[in-house]
Amino acid sequence: MIPLSWYLFLSLILFTIGVLGVLIRRNAIVIFMCIELMLNSVNLALVGFSSYIGNEIGQMLVFFVLVVAAAEVSVGLAIIIAIFRNRLTVNIDEINLLKW
Amino acid sequence: MNFYNDLLGISPVLIVSLAGLIVVILEALFKKGETISYFLSIISLILAGLFAIYTYSMYSTAFNGMVAVGGYASFFNFIFCVGALLTILLSKDYLAKRNINYGEFYILVLFATAGMMFLASGVDLIITFLGIELMSISLYVLAAFARTDPKSNEAGLKYLLLGAFATGFLLFGIAFIYGSTTTTNLKVISANFQNYQNDFLFWLGVGLLLVGFSFKVAAVPFHMWAPDVYEGAPTPASGFMSAVSKSAAFGAFVLVFIFGFNGTNEQVRYAIAIISVLSMALGNIIALSQTNIKRMLAYSSIAHAGYILIGLASANELGKQGVLYYSLAYILMQVGAFGVVSIVEREENKALNINDYAGLGHRKPLIGVLMSIFMFSLTGFPPFAGFVGKYYLFASAVQAKMTWLAVAGVLATLVSVYYYLNVVINMYLKEQPAEVLNNPEQEKISISSAFAVLISAIGIFIIGILPTLVTRYFEKLF
């Protein structure tokens, strides 16, 4: 059996890639994909814990996370489309009306 | 408890969500459904508030220990109903003024309120997560509600990206806590708390949860989104987001950190104290240099998150009561202040500068007096509610042997006097601008908005003079 730590390290690596992507990339849609990557890395950790502990709470939480992520994507893409219609860009460096 | 009792226990959430669903259908069926939606939302929120009072004495948990009912949950459900009701009363004329009079606004407020109710009564981390997401996703749309206004779009995008980012941290924290405790139920975690003292994964999870919650309450260093979002969003929605959703996040914060993790340990409490001091200092100092009143209130809301965090850092009985009392007081004064801003605001984001308030106290005596009450209460002058709330929070820090934290709070309050009173000085001691004098009909005040602002001011006054009216409900919370 593959030990728990492998799942956790993979999950941590994916989470870190997601965080770095959010901080470094400038395209709103790519940032959004990186956030989804963070959520999915959490799902991996939850499933790993669940099979290691031997109860089903973690797997149940994964389903809730999937639903919430889907809702967030639909709202997020709608907002990005609204921005694109007004400004013709999704680069977050150019979306800077509000500051100080 | 049997099933029907459980349903009665969460009846405020059921009423609000059901009303939200009905309004969705009404909006689809009728072309001009806004007025029906408006009245239906008001009625459902009043009903939910009454049920929250009715279920107060239940003191229990429902659905196999997933949600708390009665006591603590009832108190928070009630104050969310009050906050949402004031927001809806304020928003009708504002939406008409901005030409965005769509009934979807009320749907989103109702769903966000349902999310807040779950958030502040979740005894299971799964419910906390679902509540925070239901609230946040509704608020992302509310922030971007003025679809053709680039500022509102930008506010929505910033809130969405940073809010979803924070959700990732919160969820990772929940995963680690589940991994080390094998459960997500806060009661079970609290009962076995001493077993996790030396568990690295558990404390990593607590740290990540702290980051996630700090994002939701907009505490420094996780505050970057707040000023932009509150400035760009429609004004009544800004008040709703900055006051009511913040109280909801604090309700969950207290449930998780004080009831679930037994007040955590010394190091985590010091970390919370440092976040609190940073929020108070940075929020107040940057607010000094703001010229836009919405942005000033946004920075002041960061400072207020710092004040409330004092109660969590001291983690004693007085601190808990301070958080609860201040949540109510803060909802009344912040929604009221944003209400006045939304009344004074004219179409296309005009009249939002603090200079635009010059002479307002002479032109509109009632609005001037009410705005002064909100500003004095936000500063913390007696006899208003802000003073009593700050007294509770600072006293709790002294009781927990963190006197330096209370001193920092008092110093931060002193700094805040300048920018709050600046608004009052502008209203009463500055000359009125000539262009407004020539067009007096530009500043019309509708009855429902004036009523909502008046109610908040009276509320601040009453619970400020008679704090026991509220605090006697804190004797028994569970």
Image (cartoon, rainbow, N blue to C red):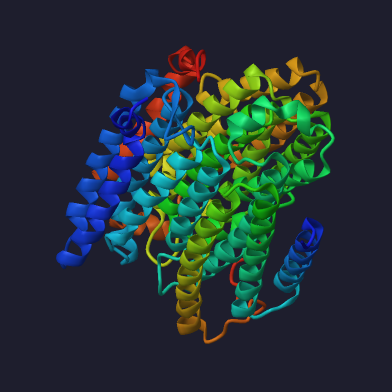
List x then y, in percent, for residue B256.
Answer: 62, 35
Residue name at image x 73 percent, y 34 percent: B412
List x then y, in percent, for residue B177.
Answer: 69, 44
Q: Is residue B152 above or below residue B115?
A: below
Report the residue that reaches farthest toward the front.
A1
Q: Pick the residue in front: B373 or B334.
A: B334
Q: Quadrant of the N terminus of chain A?
A: bottom right
List x then y, in percent, for residue B383.
Answer: 52, 19
Answer with left or right where residue A39 lies relative to residue B398. left
Q: Pick the residue in front: B459 or B62.
A: B62
Q: Pick the residue in front: B73 or A95.
A: B73
Residue name at image x 62 percent, y 20 percent: B392
Q: Is residue B260 above or below residue A30?
A: above
Residue B223 visible, this orientation: no
Q: Quadrant of the C terminus of chain A?
A: bottom right
List x then y, in percent, for residue B361.
Answer: 43, 40
Residue name at image x 63 percent, y 53 percent: B171
